[in-house]
Image: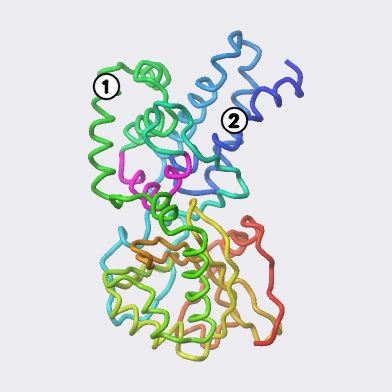
């Protein structure tokens, strides 16, 4: 098989294979590596492929096995809510190693389609990339994770999944039942896709505009007025997180919106949810530089959760009081590359 023939064979599956690896591993960078290994193994075995109709199942079998091998040699990734209890009144603290955390997914640049992969799917493709769903998956054993994704996100039959995983239909059905129950305990009753549809483009735009305006003006009352009462705010790679709204209010007044930070934000999308790329004024650079990618989870027309993936803290007004990245603990270059992966500018011009 020629290089061009192989490229034609796999290209239409590349984006969804990457998303599958991300769902399995909770990391965009790990998904990059897993996809590369998947395509390498596929290339080596492509000469023996006889039935073109089986390409999809063949590729997903390889990708799933690659991911299961990776999961066997490392601990699961989580969000701060699952790492430890909330810390009312605590300063943001020092980062934990970046391999601990789930990473945000640039669904628009990768190309996650709308709708279901097959008519038999329970989850739409974009529902299957939402942050709460991916976080819930990380609590499953690798085999349960694979079964749930193959059956309910990708729409393979029980017989197909059993063949792909080298097990029996009974084992697949048993694993699926346990996986369903575990995931349902951890995800909201309503998906973000359903919430966004009910809010509408105009409603979302209005909510985001008011949120950004509150941060750029350091208006704590306006910011917390956009939160539900039991809202949460987390900042990986920091383990510290805050809830409910009154505690978030205290944190905002003492740290992020205390008047010493000067913010600008750009709307983007992550995990099929609205996200805001926040830039902080850097006096030395004379411009706003990337600080954090805030993924918003909405409920009842308000913000229910903010997961702010911090990418840097140099140039902060008082970095020791907020966050610093010890070189021995953090891969600063990988963190800084988050904005680039989302197609976001390296700086925002304008006065501080």
Alpha-carbon span between mark 1 and mark 2: 27 Å
The answer to which of marks 1 and 2 sits earlier in the sequence is 2
Could you tell me residue 259's position as x and y percent? 49, 91
Q: Is 341 left, or right, of 174 in this rendering?
A: right
Whether 132 is among the magenta residues is yes
Can residue 101 be found in the magenta stretch? no
The percent coordinates of residue 216 (x first, y second) are: 54, 82
State the SS at label 1. helix
Residue beneath the point at 35% across and 61% down: 299
Q: Residue 180: which quarter of the image?
A: top left
Circles 1 and 2: CB distance less than 8 Å?
no
257 is higher (above) or lower (below) than 154: below
Q: Which label is found at residue 242?
A: none
Decide: is 125 above or below 120: below
Labelled disc at residue 171: 1
Circle 2: element type: loop
> Which portion, as a residue range, is magenta?
125-140
């Amino acid at each position: 098989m020629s290089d061009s023939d192989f490229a034609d064979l796999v290209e239409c599956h590349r984006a969804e294979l990457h998303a599958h690896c991300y769902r399995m591993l909770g990391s965009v960078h790990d998904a990059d590596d897993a996809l590369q290994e998947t395509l390498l193994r596929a290339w080596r075995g492509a000469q023996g492929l006889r039935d073109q109709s089986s390409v999809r199942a063949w590729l997903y079998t390889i990708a799933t096995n690659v991911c299961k091998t990776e999961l066997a040699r490392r601990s699961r990734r989580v969000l701060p809510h699952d790492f430890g209890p909330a810390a009312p009144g605590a300063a943001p603290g020092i980062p934990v190693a970046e391999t601990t955390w789930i990473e945000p997914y640039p669904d628009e640049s990768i190309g996650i389609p709308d709708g279901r992969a097959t008519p038999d799917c329970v989850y739409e493709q974009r529902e299957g990339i939402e942050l709460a769903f991916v976080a819930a998956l990380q609590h499953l054993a690798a085999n349960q994770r694979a079964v749930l994704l193959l059956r309910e996100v990708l729409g393979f039959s029980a017989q197909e999944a059993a063949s792909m995983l080298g097990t029996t239909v009974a084992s697949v059905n048993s694993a699926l039942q346990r996986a369903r129950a575990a995931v349902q305990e951890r995800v909201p009753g309503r998906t973000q896709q359903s919430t966004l549809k009910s809010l509408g483009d105009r409603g979302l735009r209005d909510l985001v505009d008011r949120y950004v305006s509150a941060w750029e003006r350091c208006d704590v009352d306006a910011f917390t007025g956009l939160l539900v009462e039991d809202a949460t705010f987390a900042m990986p790679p920091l383990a510290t997180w805050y809830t409910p709204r009154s505690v978030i209010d205290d944190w905002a007044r003492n740290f992020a919106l205390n008047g010493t930070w000067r913010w600008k934000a750009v709307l983007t999308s992550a995990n099929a949810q609205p996200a805001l790329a926040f830039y902080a004024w850097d006096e030395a650079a004379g411009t706003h530089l990337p600080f954090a990618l805030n993924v918003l989870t909405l409920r009842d027309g308000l913000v229910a959760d903010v997961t702010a993936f911090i990418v840097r803290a140099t140039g902060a007004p008082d970095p020791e009081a907020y966050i610093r990245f010890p070189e021995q603990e953090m891969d600063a270059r990988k963190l800084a590359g988050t904005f680039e992966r989302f197609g976001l500018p390296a700086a925002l011009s304008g006065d501080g």
